[in-house]
Amino acid sequence: MEKKLPLLVVKLKQVNKKGFTLLEAILVLTIISICLLLFTRTTTSSTSLSLEMDKVKSILLLAQREAILTKQVEYVQIQNSQIISGKKTYQLARGMTCGEHEIYFNERGNVNQARTITCTFNNQQKQLVIHLGSGNIYAK
């Protein structure tokens, strides 16, 4: 029996040398977590601008559809970081500005004049173009 015990100890030592210790595993997971955190922070600002532009476009499309459904003129006013449409006021993200615009959709969904709305956020710019004849709205 005494001869078998030293063999077990030798086998256990070999197994421990092949695997990670708990400290090494925690260190690797910490480094990976920090790298992922840094990567996600850099992509947030560009994503926010795209999302906010989609929000502005959605508000304009909603006003356009409302004008078509009610057969009445729908008025939208953009004041830098807020949009007033009908009786509702929408707030854009902090630091985002879109200038000052007054847009009228007639009962057919057409606008009173063609527009290009330029919005800025964190030194980035995107534009929404509203066509005069059709009332189409698209991001540029």
Image (cartoon, rainbow, N blue to C red):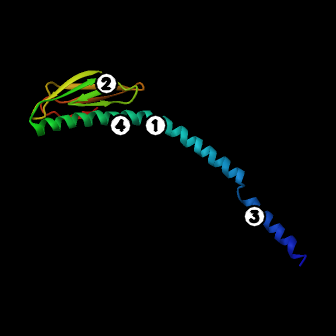
Q: Are marks 2 and 3 in contact (CB under 8 Å)?
A: no
Q: Secondary structure at mark 1?
A: helix
The Cα atoms of the two marked residues, 4 and 1, are separated by 12 Å
Q: Amino acid at mark 3?
A: Val
For marks 2 and 4, give the CA distance.
14 Å
Using a 10 Å C-alpha cutoff, classify the residue at mark 1 as few (fewer than 14 neighbours), some (14 to 19) or many (20 or more). Answer: few
Residue at mark 2 to residue at mark 3: CA–CA distance: 64 Å
Mark 2: amino acid: Cys
Q: Quadrant of the C terminus?
A: top left
- Dot 2 surroundings within 10 Å: few (below 14), some, or many (20 or more)? many
Q: Position of residue 77 (x, y in %)?
A: 23, 25
Give how far across and how far down residue 118 sits, in percent.
30, 25
137 displayed left or right of 125: left
Q: Amino acid at mark 4?
A: Leu
Pointer 4 or 1: first along the chain: 1
Quadrant housing the N terminus: bottom right
Q: Which residue is mark 1?
A: 43
The residue that disc 3 covers is: 15
Residue 27, image x, y percentages: 67, 47
Amino acid carrying mark 1 in the image? Thr
| Residue on which the image places disc 2 | 98
Could you tell me if the residues under marks 4 and 3 are in contact, i.e. CB atoms within 8 Å? no
Residue 51 marker: 4
